[in-house]
Amino acid sequence: MKIAQRIKAFFIFFEFVITVTIVIFLMIFFNTKNWDIRRAWAKLQSKLIGYEIEIEGEPDPNTQMLLLNHQSLLDIVVLEDIYPKDIAWVAKKEIGNIPFFGKILTVPKMIEVERENKKSLIKLFSDVKERLQNDRVVAIFPEGTRGDGRKLASFKSGAKLITTKLELIVQPVVLLNTRNILDSKNFTAKRGKVKVIYLDSVRITKASDKSWFESIRTQMQNEMNNQLKID
């Protein structure tokens, strides 16, 4: 079974290299259609990788920032497929620096951040404001790294600072089973069902209780526990 899953992972890796290359060229030549191109690519992945998506709850049309748990590259693919608005992902600047393939961030104007550079925070505020003004929704993984799909890591402060300063409407989203389907750590892939759970959105202001960020993390963890039957 593991051998078959590894073979499938290799297939997906090479398929990603080919299809992402095509997507980058299409976005360059048809820049005004980059969201449509990304969404079409994401829908194609559900067929090539072989997964279904189950959705619980609804995206709030007024949401400005999505907070998501992170466990797999598939998290991004799934949201690109189903989310009804153009997402601006917050990602490590190192990804944007990758020759050619870094254009997957730069061409559609995703938001690059240098985690160790404090000056980067000023640009981050500016970039988030600009994307919101262009009717995009900012998406961030507040853990700052991939988890095991069962227990959330501590949330980094960046998302809290941005949300509070700009007084954004935030919607937490819980993703389940993406790592089981596409596990880059163990380099395995298999068919399965992804569950996407939209939790209630929250409007954050400078007067909001300072515990709101940790409360959202607790809410997301409780939802994961309930869904995975974890005590």
Image: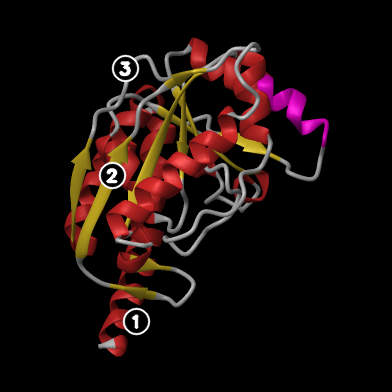
Above/below status of 111 relative to 149: above
Residue type, label 1: Arg
Q: Residues within 10 Å of mark 2 (few under 14, many from 20)?
A: many
Q: Give the residue at mark 1.
A: 6
Tell me, yes or no, if residue 22 can be seen here: no
Above/below status of 10 relative to 182: below
SS for tag 3? loop
What is the quadrant of the N terminus in the image?
bottom left
Residue type, label 2: Val
Query: Who comes first in sequence, dot 3 or dot 1?
Result: 1
**Labels 3 & 1 near each other (Cβ < 8 A):** no
Span colored in magenta: 118-125
The x and y percentages for residue 225 are: 37, 55
Q: Is residue 112 magenta?
A: no
Report, in whole angstroms, how far the alpha carbon at label 3 lies from the one at label 2.
Answer: 16 Å
The x and y percentages for residue 84 are: 27, 26
What is the quadrant of the C terminus in the image?
bottom left
Q: Residue at x 37, y 44 (%)?
A: 174
SS for tag 1? helix
Q: Give the residue at mark 2.
A: 196
Q: Where residue 229 is drawn, which disc sits there?
A: none
Q: Give the residue at mark 3.
A: 61
Picture quadrant where residue 167 is located: top right
Q: Residue at x 37, y 14 (%)?
A: 62
